[in-house]
Image (cartoon, helix red, strand yellow):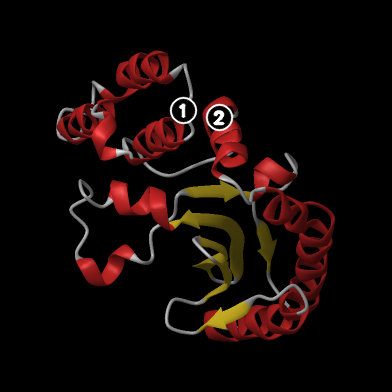
Amino acid sequence: MTKKEVRNKIITVLKVSLLKHGFIYNSKIGSFYKSKDDWKYEVILGLYDYNPEYKFSFGLCIRNNKVESIFHKFSGTIAEYQQSSCTSLTPLKYFDDKTVDYKITNENELSIALNEFLQLFENKIIESINYFTTLELLEKEFNTNPNFNVISIPDTYIHGLILAKLCNNTNFEDLVKSYAAIVDPYIHEKNKYYAVVEYLRDESNIL
């Protein structure tokens, strides 16, 4: 199988299976998404060619427009790409610690892997999608479970602080300190982190 054949098979199977949950395929970026009000939930495919073996996995992107509108004041991302950002990005391992990715070498193995993923989706992933519908629920998991989000540093901690502030988390300053200890070694990134912190400390910016 070629990488294109593997991708096409995955997309064809998921188009049918995820449609019943309201997910639409976005051919421009190769993901499946559903939106409601300020929320977008997106199943993102990562596919890697180690011919003759192929490896693929999925991530669940949850986006809240209110969070992202604050984040992009500091992100440096050009406007046309800002709508593609995630508030949180959750790997398969969060839903099943035995599942990191799928490795296949032929069409039969691909079918088995897709069945396994769809079982995981039906049993656990869709449950999370239906659960995380408020900032408060997302914030609690984001800032207490380190396995929930895999966005890069410092953006993951910036998102955590934005969520905490929007949800009036009384531990906001404690989070600032604990996250700063992780961010500080990243010399080229920490200025952005502290700029966001000062912005969030000004209550007039959050009203």
Residue sitting nearer the eye, 144 or 105: 144
Q: Can you tell which of label 1 and label 2 is closer to the viewer?
A: 1
Tag 2: Cα neighbours inside 10 Å, few (<14), some, or many (≥20)? few
Q: Quadrant of the N terminus?
A: bottom right
Give the side of residue 181 with respect to residue 37, left or right.
left
Between disc 1 and disc 2, whose residue precedes?
2
Give the side of residue 105 with respect to residue 152, left or right.
right
Q: Are marks 1 and 2 in contact (CB under 8 Å)?
A: no
Q: Quadrant of the C terminus?
A: top left
The residue shown at (25%, 35%) is: 204
Q: Label 2's element?
A: loop
Please, is residue 132 above or below residue 165 in the view? below
The residue shown at (59%, 56%) is: 60
Which x, y percent locates residue 83?
Answer: 36, 66
| Residue 85 sits in quarter | bottom left
Which x, y percent locates residue 102?
Answer: 68, 59
Name the residue carrying label 1: 168
Residue sitting nearer the eye, 152 or 39: 39
Q: Label 1's element?
A: loop
Residue sitting nearer the eye, 10 or 124: 124
| Residue 119 sits in quarter | bottom right
Which x, y percent locates residue 182?
Answer: 34, 21
The residue shown at (26%, 52%) is: 72
Report the amino acid beneath label 1. Asn
Return the mark for residue 146: 2
Report the amino acid beneath label 2. Pro
